[in-house]
Image: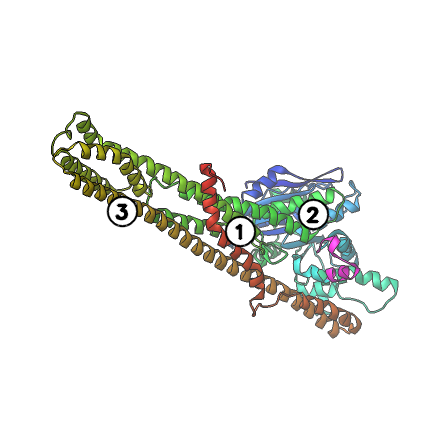
Amino acid sequence: MESPVCLIENIDGTLRVVQEATEYLMRINQPVVVVAVVGLYRTGKSYLMNKLAGKRKGFALGATVQSKTKGIWMWCVPHPVKEGHTLVLLDTEGLGDVEKGDQKNDAWIFSLAILLSSTLVYNSRGTIDNQAVENLQYVTELTERIKVKAPSASSAEDDDAEDAQFVQFFPSFVWAVRDFTLLLEIDGRQVNEDQYLEHALTLKKGRDRRTVDYNLPRECIRNYFPTRKCFIFETPAPPEKMAHLESMTESELSPSFQAVAFDFCNYIFKESSVKKVKGGLPVTGRMLSHLAKTYVETIASGGVPCLENAVLTMAQIENQAAVEEGLQVYQRGMQGLTFPVSMEEMSNEHRNWDSQATKTFMSRSFNDDSGEYLKTLADAINKEYASFLLKNEDMSEKVCRQLLSELSEDMANKLKNGFYAKPGGYELYCSDHDNLVAEYRKRPKKGVKAEEVLENFLKEKSVESNSVLQADKNISEKERKIHEEKVKAAMLEQEKKAEEQKRLELERTLQDERRSQEEKLQMMREKMEEDLKSQRKEAERAVECKLKEQRDLLEKGFKDKAEMMSQEIENLKAERPKEDKSGNFFTNHLFPLIGHGLQALSTVYQYKALKKGLGF
């Protein structure tokens, strides 16, 4: 992406996703690291984002007191450190814009930045004093603007539990303090940037209204953003040059400012994680597009964005797309066959592309614990396989009939010219007949209908053969009967060969389906184990963050608040996915798929029959 584009428009207080931007995201199949910057208007947010993009120009900086960024703008660039990842930069509309004067709209912009990002950068000017913290008032409204679970499934008690769960799904937090002019000291003791931030977020003891109001935004920041980092920037240039910051070269900027900017970018590049959704699933650009549309449409309709609903919606879209993508892999692979082919070759190709299709599906699908979409893919592949089997049979029959027609042309001419209508003619006929069959069997690439077509050919020629036999005056009645029995035996033998070919085809297909189902079950088990592992890791991280916050509260004398956190921690522990040592989880989820697999073979042949117009 050469330059930023608007992802979410904000026109007269109405938010709308920009189609061109979401279409661009839909083409990104890589995991995305999403960094969003928020803050008061005209505080230099866009400059930081341009630095992260490695460009001097991009996001509008402006040189007046008017806010330049409206809505949320996006810039997608290759991640400079993590290969195979895309860095998505989101520059948000400045909060507190006097021209707009709409705090509710600001709150939604702030909420969307949190919902879409894996790292949230809060940009402010001056110092982190009480006013700076209070300017981050939107953090106190997040429980009203974001829900973890669907409203129909939550109760009043769940609302309190959700407050604790935010830590699992919220981005890491970076506070960038711009134009800092003071000394980094607390009570005469020199401190670093992170210590400065933590001091600013220290709670006060007391239960009076003023203390409660003072503590509220700090508690929210501490609870929702356990991973916190601070960068303090000095003024980059003299005041008279600040209006031309975009056109200034790096050498014209303050060395100390450049050093902090370098550290800031380096931290974001190395420490910002891939965006994940509930369940620990890494988000791709395509999935981010779905999330943006779902959240904005919910807000526009007057609703409250719900993480659970958004993931369910995205899962439905992605899983259906995974089915289609997997099916396309199978179709393209099988279309490379040149019919007719042997059943062995057909079977090998089917197994190969069925496996590739399943792997493609697995790489994109998620939350398909019941195997619903995997079964849909298997069913679609069975239909396609039935179609390919019929095409192969039709082409085999056509090739074999053409071959027999060519090989029997000489005999037909001899018969027409009366060559066999003489004493000893039947012996000549049988010799030519045997040579024809032998030559037919020698020819390669006849396909799966070779024996059946030969059987039908011999049946058709039996009348002709009998006529020549009856006309041969050199053959006695006894010899005729012997010849007739030999012909019947040969016909019966050929019929057995045709049946054997059908039996082998059926057996091979059954074997293929069993192997296919075993492979699908193994893939699904591995994927579910991996998903559970990610969910446990995510839950454990949330518990550890809460325990760290609890220890900090105890160290600073907030025993009551620390004890109140105990229930939150127990709730998080209780919701952690348990290790399935008994195998019951997989049994309950995978057995239905096994049952589906037992029906797969009959399904293939039902499809074949239906395509032939026979029905069941």
Query: In the image, is residue 161 part of the stretch drawn in magenta?
Result: yes
Work out whether mark 2 precedes mark 3 in sequence or the reverse, and give the earlier one. 2
Q: Nearer the viewer, residue 66 or 189?
A: 66
**What residue is drawn where x is 33% and y is 47%?**
501
Work out whether mark 1 precedes mark 2 in sequence or the reverse, and give the earlier one. 2
> Which secondary structure is most common in the magenta stretch?
helix
Spot occupied by residue 302 in the image (x, y as percentages of width and height): 76, 44
Residue, disc 2: 239
Circle 2 — which element? helix
Residue, disc 1: 374
Spot occupied by residue 220 in the image (x, y as percentages of width and height): 75, 60
- Categorize mark 1 by other alpha carbons within 10 Å: few (<14), some (14-19), many (20+): many
**Which amino acid type corresponds to the residue marked 3 in the rendered image?**
Glu
**What residue is drawn where x is 47% and y is 42%?**
607
Q: Nearer the viewer, residue 181 or 145?
A: 145
In the rendered image of this protein, does residue 367 appear above or below residue 164? above
Circle 3 — which element? helix
**What residue is drawn where x is 28% and y is 36%?**
457
Q: Is residue 571 left or right of residue 461?
A: right
Q: Nearer the viewer, residue 80 or 114?
A: 114
- Categorize mark 3 by other alpha carbons within 10 Å: few (<14), some (14-19), many (20+): few
Q: Is residue 99 left or right of residue 307?
A: right
Number of the front mark, 1 or 2: 1
Spot occupied by residue 132 in the image (x, y as percentages of width and height): 76, 56
Circle 1 — which element? helix
Is the C-beta separation of discs 3 and 1 under 8 Å?
A: no
**Which amino acid type corresponds to the residue marked 1 in the rendered image?**
Leu
Does residue 401 appear anywhere in the picture?
yes
What is the magenta range? 148-163
**Which amino acid type corresponds to the residue marked 2 in the rendered image?**
Pro
Number of the front mark, 3 or 1: 3
Residue, disc 3: 493
